[in-house]
């Protein structure tokens, strides 16, 4: 009996549905793209599609963590893509500010040099992104602009700012230590996975081991009541947006490290939408309130598993977008109480004596 | 076809919510041309029964007969179409659209092109409202008016249905004053004489005995019985509702409770000419240790404003606020919380509960706010606190992990009270704490207030029930037109206060 | 986002415009509409106002193209009215309308797509302002604009196909990373490539990488996981994607040259990849069209003979010269 | 009389202020760039933004009912491709246009159904709808499809002279947009559907308990937005005489921005279509100013649009705050 209780508990946990979706996707892969599961060892580290999902999905997972908090407060952050571009631009420019207007000389290209120490680059990266988050937070919590509008402003202007930083150039990075974040390995696994874990742990400690998580949920559900309870709902929102900016900056760091460059126009393109989708696939409501960061990370993994699956089975390019729409819709319909009710009813009929437990 | 005397009857209604059996096999029948009271404690299932009758919820079991034929009511819209007009508990109107629309939408007068005729609509709405003695600008959005006005508008809307055969009123009087209530009753009597059946829910026994013909009592979701009002003594009614003897309750509500003596000394809380332009005139108020000060006034007299200013919801622009003799410099709920002030707000739904949080989380919310972001109350401690207050206030719930939005109105109010008691405040401001609360709980809350005063706390008690204010308070201050107009000691009688409130003294 | 578009041929610019007297008067139709202007005034660079509704700043190629126009205008003293349409055709069109109302002398238009220009070209014609189509072409009637200057995407694809043939004389399987689905550059290059590709070379997979580094990488990753060592070559529609793809190839443990790569653009990044040995051939696509366009504009305005169709010359670069040329690349 | 005017001014403060900002802003721009004083420049706003206006009208309704529709731009693109492809297949243009409208309406209604009945977030449903429509457009054709049909050509190039302004003109589709705009004003103010929309936007639960037809209204609102999008698509294909899956990238964001600038709150229940018209005009003016300036780098254009948007919303909010203070 205990076992079934455990299962029931699991079934009602927030991780259940995203895990289900991921499993179904992987089962599909098992049939149509068996190579998906091959994991080999190459140069002393693991290598394979599943590793790629983790590695490529890392920036999205990180952004999704921040986005979860913002959405939980009942807001949304459309600017994360632009924030990614700004922080990546910051890093690229600090590594080599000479690249902007001047011709590259061979010694720049071959020299593994940087104008700024790595630590400072990372700090500046993070500072830039966090500052953007702070700006969003101030607009939302102090100026009281609706979240979608407030972040739309940075969404539009942000890539312009990133271009301003890089002087409109696509900046290629030639500094090897910087590549470690996106391409390095620790104990056979990509560094980016550890970064996700680190950000998650920081966020989790911050949110669940303090009262911030409770406050965020409370603000998301009823910000007026929260205010009346003596909680500074402004600061709670400010925190969420700032943290989301912080997450964006880390994602910017990894993404620019992946491809050794910063293309202000394209880096992190549409990440805001994918991040929102990850959060929603993870079962957090866009109206705010209860949230689960782990589910959002799963959501990000679902999106990347799907993307790589499509590449692998070779879906024609022109049907990709429509296929993605249908998949995500199906996953999200699983959250609809109506649809779930239907599934549960079918399950109960089959199970016969299934008793609804509390 | 056989004409039954019953216009609406329900048999064997059963409704289960996750973890709560809200209704179990409840029968209810309403005659044409009667006023029928539905009575029961908080959480007895009154509102749920109404919701089942009007299609908001679908009952798990049971049948409904309307006008001699079995019906399944799909939705509130359907209910209206067949002739059931309803005013739900907690005002349920749209605050952004005009008063006239709130009254008329759904049966708005049409112009030549089938368009809405705004002129006619405004006229009709104003006329209907005036029947209840409300004269307001109907073109203004509803949201700018007080809860009481909104309640009147909701009632007007229900009455506006020409074809209605049944009118259901779920605690319509909880935020009305005596005069407005009387006007409502006049209208009810008139409708009754036209053969309309009226269901009336209230926690005010006086009102029940004033207008109703029959009473149906629910207890814990179960049907207790239906009685002729005239043949059911109050004590019996209460006994039926509570399912226990009421002699002790009776004692409590009749005897003066103010056992503690207030010692003059350092005021705990003092306002000096504190006010805010367009909000509240400069006001002096002084609260001693162990003291309960009652605020009396008509609706819209500025009591809530005074409470909000003291608690820091709004920042005063004149005068000063002293706590224990120290001047308060920054105003926000958090500052007040740290200064030991607590406020149970008037608008429970919008400013009180956080519906999707559990009862436990709601109760510890303010305490946690005082501890700050990083001093997290351990889970076990949270449960301890929650359990303590659930017991202390008698909150009816299967577990502290129930979502607060699933509680009945009265129990939600208790949760908010618990939230503030948990912070162990020095000054407790209660704005309409007993609205929508049953007799038993009401007495408990009154007792609690006095107990607190006995333990060295102070209290500001706002209520529209004069009797209640008098019973609990050591001093009564009367507000009128957003201004403090008079202050009375313990010996004042309600007549004096009433005249002061009305301004004819 | 529309991607790196082509338009090769800095050297071609230097060549004198071929005289095609019959076409000139007709193309310079504005002269008829505003005779006073044309007759009275001999245009010089410093009296000419040119409108350039740039399409966006989505790629290296595009920013180099913008810079070329701005620099040239600065050097020659041409008054340039520049705007950025952010990849939206509607913005390009409204920018053209704004230019018409400002009464510019000539409009140089880098169209985002070939269709949809009829109405606004007509408006320009009515206002007597000649239009030069830059880079991509438009489908409107030839009488609607004065001249076209740009490159031929199909030709680029053909060149890439020839290079691939040379690199894989014994045939083999290759993959294609194509540009943004539906963009002229992507369709043209794909079409040309297939035209010249030998029969013994098989394109086993083709997927879009949207002309960006970030998407080039995962697409290549997926190819490598799926086909592994079967892949002998790759045709990649621009250098940005090539750089992304090379990251994936590196990570999969391949050595430079294991997979023969033919790319398009000839940007600095592409050259660097050639120096490092990853890319075997890079088909140039020159964005520096500023000088050529301005000269053409002046000829049109002054009623001098000009070439109504200028095709920019396309070079192919190889690793041997890459290291030498790299420092001189402007973009 | 004066009282009535005063009342009108008070009740419509935000809207009037939006209009005032537009007028003053346009005037200042006209001083800086004299070419902008030409009437044709003003009417170009209606030519350039006809489709945006149509999309924004539908979006206004959706936003008022407390929803959001991210699929509008993709639906527009799909309409252009589908109609171009059908024209190529020699289908009668007079069959195609109603067909496209039916497509838009039914897709909108379908989205509304999922949102309302299955209780899925509007943001997500319409985002997926947007992916789906663009995806379908790509499946129909990857490249842009030219329209050579004479009917489309003559409709698309048909100018309508503005009476009293000499040779100043707009195109036929601009007139269509204005007609829809007027109809939308009527619907919003004078029909039960319109008023219910406002009620739902404020509080859906209340609207339901008031016995208003919540489900039907919400589905209709999305259907209306679908109608506006496909009509916008027809206008777009007339203007450009072609169909292409990548047309109007991110126009949904422009539409939302216009709606917001017009004073409609994204939280629902408040706003109107007249404001949206001015939102669209302001949006168009911002773009025009940057085009008339003609010296800015592309990144300054983006930053400029962002800053001007912020500035505008800031001014509007200040005014709203002031208005609230006065009202109380
Ligand atoms: N949606 C719901 N989900 C779970 N439980 C619910 C829900 N609605 C009501 N309940 C529960 O059903 C019971 C009956 O509630 P109801 O609102 O009918 O009480 P009531 O008699 O109207 O009380 P009050 O006088 O306080 O308004 C309560 O225990 C309440 O907690
Ligand atoms: N008859 C009325 N006409 C118009 N506005 C009114 C009327 N009565 C009250 N109001 C407004 O409603 C708001 C609420 O009033 P307020 O909160 O001061 O009342 P209160 O004294 O706290 O009474 P209660 O809490 O019993 O409702 C005030 O802004 C007041 O101006
Ligand atoms: Mg109730
Ligand atoms: Mg009050």
Image (cartoon, coloured by chain):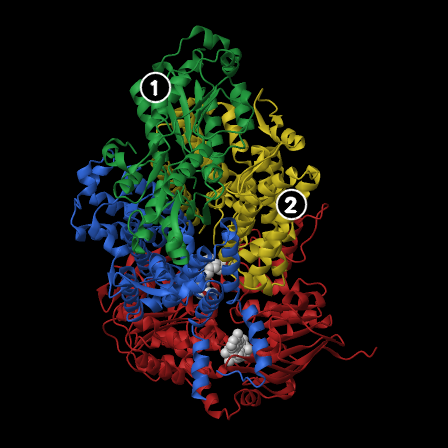
Chain colours: A blue, B red, C green, D yellow
C-alpha separation, residue under disc 2 versus residue under disc 1: 53 Å
Judged left or right of residue A294, residue A171 is left
Measured along the vertical axis of the image, is residue D213 above or below residue D246? below
Residue at the spot 40% in from the left edge and 47% down from the top edge: A152
Above or below: residue A317 compared with residue D300: below
Q: Which residue is mark 2?
A: D101
In this view, the residue in front, A243 or C253, is C253
**Residue A338: in sight, yes or no?**
yes
- The numbered disc on residue A256 is none
The answer as to whether the residues below labels 2 and 1 share one chain is no
Considering the numbered disc 1 on the image, is that residue within a helix, a strand or a loop? helix
User: Is the residue marked by circle 1 packed among few (<14), some (14-19), or many (20+) residues within 10 Å?
Assistant: few
Counting from the top left corner in percent of width and height, residue D190 is at: 64, 47
Name the residue tied to disc 1.
Answer: C14
Residue D313: image x %, image y %? Answer: 41, 44
User: Looking at the image, which residue is at 33% across and 81% down?
Assistant: B385
Is the distance from the Cβ of mark 2 to the nearest ligand 1 atom less than 8 Å? no
Where in the image, quadrant-wise, is ligand 3 located?
bottom right
């Amino acid at each position: 009996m205990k076992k079934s209780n455990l299962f029931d508990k699991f079934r009602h946990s927030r991780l259940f549905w995203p895990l289900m979706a991921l499993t179904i996707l992987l089962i599909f892969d098992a049939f149509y793209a068996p190579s998906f599961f091959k994991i080999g060892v190459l140069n002393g580290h693991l290598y394979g599609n599943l590793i790629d999902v983790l590695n490529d999905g890392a920036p999205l997972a990180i952004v999704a963590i921040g986005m979860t908090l913002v959405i939980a407060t009942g807001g949304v952050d459309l600017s994360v893509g632009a924030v990614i571009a700004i922080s990546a631009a910051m890093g690229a420019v600090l590594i080599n500010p000479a690249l902007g207007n001047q011709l590259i000389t061979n010694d720049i290209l071959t020299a593994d040099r940087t104008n700024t120490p790595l630590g400072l680059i990372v700090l500046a990266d993070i500072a830039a992104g966090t500052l953007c988050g702070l700006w969003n937070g101030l607009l939302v919590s102090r100026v009281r602009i609706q979240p979608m509008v407030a972040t739309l402003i940075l969404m539009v202007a942000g890539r312009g700012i990133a271009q301003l930083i890089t002087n409109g150039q696509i900046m290629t990075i030639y500094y090897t230590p910087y590549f470690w974040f996106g391409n390095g390995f620790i104990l056979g696994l990509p560094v980016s996975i550890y970064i996700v874990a680190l950000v998650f742990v920081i966020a989790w400690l911050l949110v669940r081991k303090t009262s911030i998580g409770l406050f965020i949920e409370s603000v998301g559900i009823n910000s007026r009541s929260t205010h009346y309870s003596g909680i500074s709902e402004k600061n709670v929102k400010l925190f969420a947006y700032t943290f989301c900016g912080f997450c964006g900056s880390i994602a910017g760091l990894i993404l620019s490290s992946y491809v050794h460059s910063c293309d202000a126009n394209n880096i992190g393109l549409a990440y805001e939408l994918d991040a929102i989708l990850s959060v929603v696939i993870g079962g957090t409501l866009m109206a705010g309130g209860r949230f689960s960061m782990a589910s959002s990370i799963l959501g990000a993994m679902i999106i990347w598993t799907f993307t790589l699956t499509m590449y692998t089975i070779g879906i024609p390019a022109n049907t990709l977008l429509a296929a993605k729409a249908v998949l995500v819709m199906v996953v999200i319909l699983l959250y609809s109480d109506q649809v779930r009710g239907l599934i549960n009813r079918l399950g109960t009929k089959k199970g016969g004596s299934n008793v609804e437990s509390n | 076809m056989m004409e039954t005397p019953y216009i609406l009857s329900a048999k064997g209604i059963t409704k289960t919510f996750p973890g709560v059996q809200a209704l179990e096999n409840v029968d209810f029948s309403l005659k044409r041309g009667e006023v029928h009271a539905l009575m029961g404690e908080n959480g007895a299932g009154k509102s749920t029964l109404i919701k089942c009758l009007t299609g908001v919820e679908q009952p798990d079991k049971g049948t409904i007969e309307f006008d001699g034929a079995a019906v399944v009511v799909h939705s509130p819209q359907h209910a209206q179409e067949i002739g059931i007009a309803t005013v739900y508990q907690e005002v349920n109107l749209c605050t952004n659209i005009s008063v006239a629309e709130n009254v008329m939408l759904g049966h708005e007068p049409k112009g030549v092109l089938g368009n809405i005729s705004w002129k006619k609509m405004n006229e009709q709405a104003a006329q209907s409202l005036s029947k209840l003695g409300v004269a307001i600008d109907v073109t203004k959005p509803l949201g700018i008016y007080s809860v009481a006005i909104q309640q009147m508008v909701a009632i007007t809307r229900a009455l506006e249905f020409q074809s209605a055969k049944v009118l259901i009123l779920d605690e319509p009087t909880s935020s009305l004053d005596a005069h407005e209530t009387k006007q409502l009753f006049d209208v009810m009597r008139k409708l009754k004489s036209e053969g309309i059946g009226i269901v009336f829910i209230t926690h005010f026994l006086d009102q029940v005995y004033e207008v109703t013909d029959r009473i149906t009592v629910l207890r814990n979701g179960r049907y207790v019985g239906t009685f002729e009002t005239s043949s059911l003594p109050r004590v019996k009614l209460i006994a039926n509702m509570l399912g226990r003897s009421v002699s002790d309750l009776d004692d409590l509500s009749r005897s003066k409770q103010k056992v503690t003596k207030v010692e003059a000394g350092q005021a705990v809380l003092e306002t000096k000419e504190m006010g805010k332009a367009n909000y509240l005139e400069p006001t002096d108020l002084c609260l001693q240790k162990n003291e309960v000060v009652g605020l009396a006034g008509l609706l819209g007299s500025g009591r809530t404003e005074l409470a909000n200013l003291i608690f820091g919801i709004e920042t005063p622009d004149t005068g000063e606020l002293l706590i224990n003799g120290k001047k308060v410099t920054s105003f926000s709920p958090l500052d007040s919380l740290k200064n030991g002030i607590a406020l149970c707000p008037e608008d429970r739904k919008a400013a009180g509960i956080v519906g999707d949080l559990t009862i436990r989380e709601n109760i510890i919310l303010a305490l946690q706010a005082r501890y700050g972001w990083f001093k997290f109350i351990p889970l076990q401690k949270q449960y301890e606190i929650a359990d303590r207050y659930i017991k202390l206030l008698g909150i009816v719930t299967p577990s502290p992990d129930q979502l607060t939005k699933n509680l009945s109105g009265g129990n939600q109010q208790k949760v908010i009270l618990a939230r503030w008691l948990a912070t162990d405040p020095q000054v407790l401001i209660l704005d309409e704490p007993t609205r929508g609360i049953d007799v038993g709980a009401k007495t408990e809350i009154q007792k609690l207030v006095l107990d607190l005063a006995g333990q060295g706390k102070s209290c500001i008690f706002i209520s529209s029930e004069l009797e209640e204010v008098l019973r609990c308070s050591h001093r009564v201050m009367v507000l009128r037109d957003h201004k403090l107009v008079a202050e009375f000691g313990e010996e004042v009688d309600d007549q004096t206060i009433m005249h002061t409130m009305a301004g004819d003294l | 986002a529309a991607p790196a578009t082509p338009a090769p041929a800095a050297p071609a610019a230097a060549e004198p415009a071929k005289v095609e007297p019959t076409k000139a008067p007709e193309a310079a139709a504005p002269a008829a509409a505003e005779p006073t202007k044309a007759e009275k005034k001999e245009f010089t660079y410093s009296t000419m106002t040119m409108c350039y509704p740039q399409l966006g700043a989505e790629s290296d190629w595009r920013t180099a193209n913008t810079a070329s126009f701005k620099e040239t205008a600065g050097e020659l003293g041409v008054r340039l009215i520049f705007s950025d349409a952010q990849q939206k055709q509607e913005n390009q069109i409204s920018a053209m309308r704004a230019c018409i109302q400002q009464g510019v002398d000539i409009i140089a238009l880098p169209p985002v797509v070939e269709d949809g220009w009829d109405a606004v070209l007509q408006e320009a014609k009515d206002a007597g302002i000649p239009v030069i189509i830059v880079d991509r072409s438009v489908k409107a009637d030839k009488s609607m604009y004065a001249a076209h200057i740009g490159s031929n995407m199909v030709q680029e694809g053909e060149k890439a196909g020839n290079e691939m043939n040379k690199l894989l004389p014994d045939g083999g399987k290759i993959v294609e990373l194509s540009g943004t689905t539906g963009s002229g550059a992507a369709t043209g290059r794909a079409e040309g490539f297939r035209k010249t590709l030998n029969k013994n070379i098989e394109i086993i997979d083709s997927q879009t990488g949207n002309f960006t580094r970030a998407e080039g990488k995962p697409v290549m990753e997926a190819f490598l996981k799926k086909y592994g060592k079967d892949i002998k070559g790759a045709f990649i529609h621009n250098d940005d994607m090539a750089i992304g793809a090379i990251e994936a190839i590196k990570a999969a443990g391949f050595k430079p040259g294991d997979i023969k790569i033919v790319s398009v653009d000839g940007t600095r990044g592409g050259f660097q990849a050639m120096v490092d040995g990853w890319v075997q051939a890079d088909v140039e696509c020159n964005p520096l069209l500023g000088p050529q366009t301005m000269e053409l504009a002046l000829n049109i305005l002054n009623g001098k003979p000009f070439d109504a169709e200028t095709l920019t010359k396309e070079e192919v670069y190889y690793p041997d010269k890459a290291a030498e040329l790299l420092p001189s690349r402007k973009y | 009389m004066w009282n009535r005017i005063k009342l009108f001014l008070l009740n419509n403060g935000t809207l009037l202020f939006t209009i005032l900002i537009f007028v003053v802003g346009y005037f200042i721009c006209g001083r800086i760039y004299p070419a902008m004083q030409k009437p044709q420049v003003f009417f170009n706003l209606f030519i350039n933004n006809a489709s945006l206006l149509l999309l924004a009208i539908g979006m206004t309704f959706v936003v008022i009912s407390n929803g959001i529709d991210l699929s509008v731009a993709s639906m527009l693109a799909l309409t252009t491709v589908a109609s171009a492809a059908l024209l190529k297949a020699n289908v009668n243009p007079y069959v195609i246009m109603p067909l496209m409208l039916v497509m838009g309406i039914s897709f909108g209604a379908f989205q509304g159904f999922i949102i309302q009945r299955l209780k899925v977030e509007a943001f997500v449903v319409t985002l997926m709808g947007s992916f789906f429509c663009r995806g379908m457009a790509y499946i129909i054709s990857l490249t842009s499809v030219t329209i050579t049909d004479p009917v489309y050509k003559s409709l698309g190039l048909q100018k309508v002279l503005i009476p009293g302004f000499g040779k100043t003109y707009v195109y036929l589709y601009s007139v269509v947009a204005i007609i829809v705009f007027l109809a939308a004003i009527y619907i919003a103010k004078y029909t039960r559907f319109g008023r219910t929309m406002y009620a739902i936007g404020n509080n859906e639960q209340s609207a339901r308990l008031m016995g208003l037809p919540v489900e039907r209204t919400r589905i209709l609102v999305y259907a209306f937005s679908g109608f506006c999008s496909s009509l916008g698509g027809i206008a777009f294909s007339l203007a450009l005489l072609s169909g292409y899956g990548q047309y109007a990238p991110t126009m949904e964001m422009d539409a939302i921005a216009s709606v917001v600038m017009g004073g409609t709150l994204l939280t629902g229940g408040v706003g109107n279509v007249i404001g949206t018209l001015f939102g669209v005009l302001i949006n168009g003016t911002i773009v025009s100013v940057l085009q008339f300036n003609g010296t800015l780098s592309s990144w300054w254009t983006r930053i400029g649009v962002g800053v001007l948007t912020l500035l505008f919303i800031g001014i509007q909010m200040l005014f709203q705050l002031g208005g609230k203070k006065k009202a109380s």
